[in-house]
Amino acid sequence: MEENKLILAIESSCDETAAAVVRNGREVLSNVISSQIDLHKLYGGVVPEIASRKHIERINQVIEEALEEGEKTLEEMDAIAVTYGPGLVGALLVGVAEAKAIAFATKKPLIGVHHIEGHISANYIENKKLEPPFICLVVSGGHTHLVRVADYGTYEILGKTRDDAAGEAFDKVARAIGLGYPGGPKIDKLSKEGNEKAIPFPKAKVNGSPYDFSFSGLKSAVLNYINSCEMKGEKINEADIAASFQKAVIDVLVEHAMMAVRDFGSDKLAIAGGVASNSGLRTAMEQACVENGIEFYHPSPIFCTDNAAMIGAAAYYEMKKGVLHGWDLNAVPNLKLGER
Ligand code: KG4
Ligand code: ZN
């Protein structure tokens, strides 16, 4: 008999309140995202207290919409899945408490999902044939991880950032050149009007850890460049800064990813997370993959930034492995990938 597992997934780890209905891990019946960006941009970044309060206000309605759009009832769900870490503790707690309450009331299994595992699993949604093993570069506002996906739910972290996440660097540089929050999409757009060779920003390497990343030096180099222009009374060219900064980030990401696929003899590379929707990164990574005979996978932008469909995709494979959580599930703000 054909399998037909329906999962209601909830995501509230940062500033998006999201719910989705996902069938068999790869078919998204609904994907509702209520973004709080307009509120947080008044403060130049996510304010944790406000995020938690907004999740509380919106979560029930978002779940109801997800069920309606998916044309399913709560009773038809086979499990309730929720992000339980990493993320902002107050924000995570709203989703976790909600998922536990629903699972308890309906007597359904509860599956806690790691947020990064969700980002990686976003690749399964539109690439029906993608299966592990593969290498995945996860680049978001909070994380920069180079991961070997050995099997569903089995991860080996090859490298990660020593300081700022890639998305964080985008957001900070955007703020410095007056673009506002969130900076990634704005730098992406402005870069198209600039010269990526205009300013030679540094491409940081971490001594002794070839797969690790470091973006704080690059961020400081951009800030120093802006300061020195101001001191000399020179007008800065924002588009050139955006393009040159973006190029410096992309070069490092592509180099590291290509090194990992070569070293591990992989023929598949996936990217994930908010920064994976960057048009320059997608083009550069695609080109490098073509040159090296590697299959390249990436989610559509809507599945790159935070959403609950990716949590439903990850939860399906966790459920298949028999990973379920009890009523003691709690938010774990610094949860490590691969930990349960
Ligand atoms: O995955 P995500 O929604 O949240 C986290 O889990 O952190 O990622 C958000 C990050 C932000 O830093 C945002 O600036 C960045 O992803 N981002 C981008 C683009 N779209 C979003 N960065 C570069 N280019 C983009 N097009
Ligand atoms: Zn995320």
Image (cartoon, grey):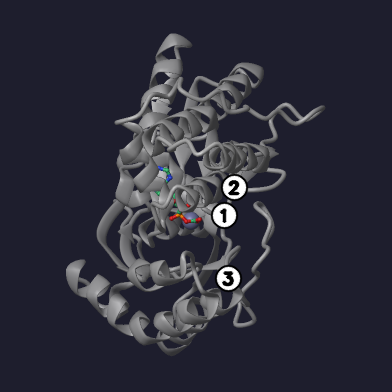
Q: Is residue 121 visible?
A: no
Tell me if residue 4 comes above or below residue 260 in the rendering.
Answer: below
Residue 232, horizontal then vertical, whole percent: 55, 36
The residue that appears at 55% across and 43% down in the rendered structure is 166
Residue topped by disc 1: 142
Q: Secondary structure beneath disc 3?
A: loop
Amino acid type at circle 1 is Gly
Going from N to C along the chain, the mark reached first, 2 or 3, is 3
Q: Secondary structure beneath disc 2?
A: loop
Give the quadrant of residue 202.
top right
State yes or no: discs 2 and 3 in contact (Cβ < 8 Å). Answer: no
Q: CA distance from mark 2 to mark 3?
A: 15 Å
Front-most of 143 and 4? Answer: 143
State yes or no: discs 3 and 1 in contact (Cβ < 8 Å). Answer: no
Residue topped by disc 3: 88
Amino acid type at circle 3 is Leu
The residue that appears at 41% across and 31% down in the rendered structure is 240
Amino acid type at circle 2 is Ala
State yes or no: discs 2 and 1 in contact (Cβ < 8 Å). Answer: yes
